[in-house]
Image (tube, rainbow, N blue to C red):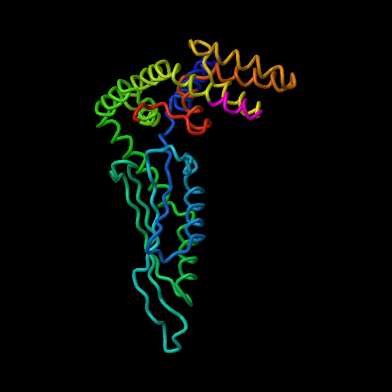
Amino acid sequence: MNYKISILLVILFSLWSTILFGQKTAYKANYVIEIPIENQVASRSQYEYLTNILKENYTGGNLFSNQSPFVLIPSIRILSEQIAGEVQVVKVIKIEIGLVTQGKDDNFTFKRFKQSYIITAENRSIAIDKALDKVNNQQKLTTFFEQSNQKILEFYESNCSNVLNSVKVNIERKEYLRAFDFLRYVPESTTCFQESEKLITKIYADSKEESCRILVQKALSEEAQRDYTKALFYLQFVDTGTDCSSSATALVNKISERIDASVLRDFEMEKLKFSKLTDLQKIEIIAREVDSIDLTLND
């Protein structure tokens, strides 16, 4: 009897483990929020409030990632406005809250969201505040993001070959960051993800020498101004496997004579951490942290 129970428990545990660990994490894209500037009835603070609402209702992505190729455009519109009663103090205002997700470069639309509210208030500003309070924590926002993410997945799956062909052209032209920007957001569940990872490795390998030269040049500029910490900041991203790395090592040795040993130890620690990262992580850090690094040759 105990043997049968044990077998049953093992089977149940196996099924539970398969369900729990076999599930794939739902794809969640990053978006850049672009707030409209012209002809707006809402104030800047009201759009900032709407931005915070979107962030709270979409916990999976970094909505403020400037590197993302996906744009989220919110809108606040007055559809109608009427006087309520004979006193003419209170107004009935119909307000529309809208959202659009689209491609940053091609303006391809993934998903639209519109929700209108009829608000009674003394003026438009108060009415907009009330409408924003109503849209907060609505399930419709979560659904909007889920559907937008699904549309992005479908777009990549349908255009995988085109994306990879464009990237290969960029790599041939040594437009490394442009190629990387295409690849870094390829969803893991798409059929071209594995090939995109291989291309990222190729991008990093091909761009290491050029990246090293730019990093050393920036470090030399900071060293000349005696900003040794900033110089070491650039040098920590130099790949030791490059021909150019000897110049970086010579500069580190020169700087080490002018700084505390603790500063040099911190540099060595950060450099070690960087060396253990994946090629994708390395490219992301260089693109994000190092100001004005441009690995393209479009000049």
Q: Using the image, determine if residue 241 lies above or below residue 39.
A: above
Of residues 139 and 202, the one drawn nearer to the viewer in this rendering: 202
Q: Who's the residue at 60% across and 13% down the image?
A: 250
Asked whether 224 falls inside the magenta stretch, the response is yes
Q: Using the image, determine if residue 75 lies above or below residue 156.
A: below
Q: Who's the residue at 40% across and 54% down the image?
A: 74
Q: Position of residue 101 (x, y in %)?
A: 35, 46
Q: Position of residue 33 (x, y in %)?
A: 43, 48
Q: Who's the residue at 32% across and 42% down the image?
A: 103
Of residues 94 and 250, the one drawn nearer to the viewer in this rendering: 250
Residue extending farthest to the front is 224
Count numbered badges in the picture.
0
Magenta stretch: helix, strand or loop mostly: helix
Q: Position of residue 29 (x, y in %)?
A: 41, 38
Residue extending farthest to the bottom is 86
Left of 275 or right of it: where is 142?
Answer: left
Quarter holding residue 188? top left
Of residues 187 and 69, the one drawn nearer to the viewer in this rendering: 69
Of residues 247 and 132, the one drawn nearer to the viewer in this rendering: 247
Please state, as top left, top right, bottom left or bottom right, where the N terminus lies in the image. Answer: top right
Q: Position of residue 158 (x, y in %)?
A: 25, 32
Please state, as top left, top right, bottom left or bottom right, where the C terminus lies in the image. Answer: top left
Instruction: Report the magenta residues as a range.
Output: 218-226
Asked whether 96 falls inside the magenta stretch, the response is no
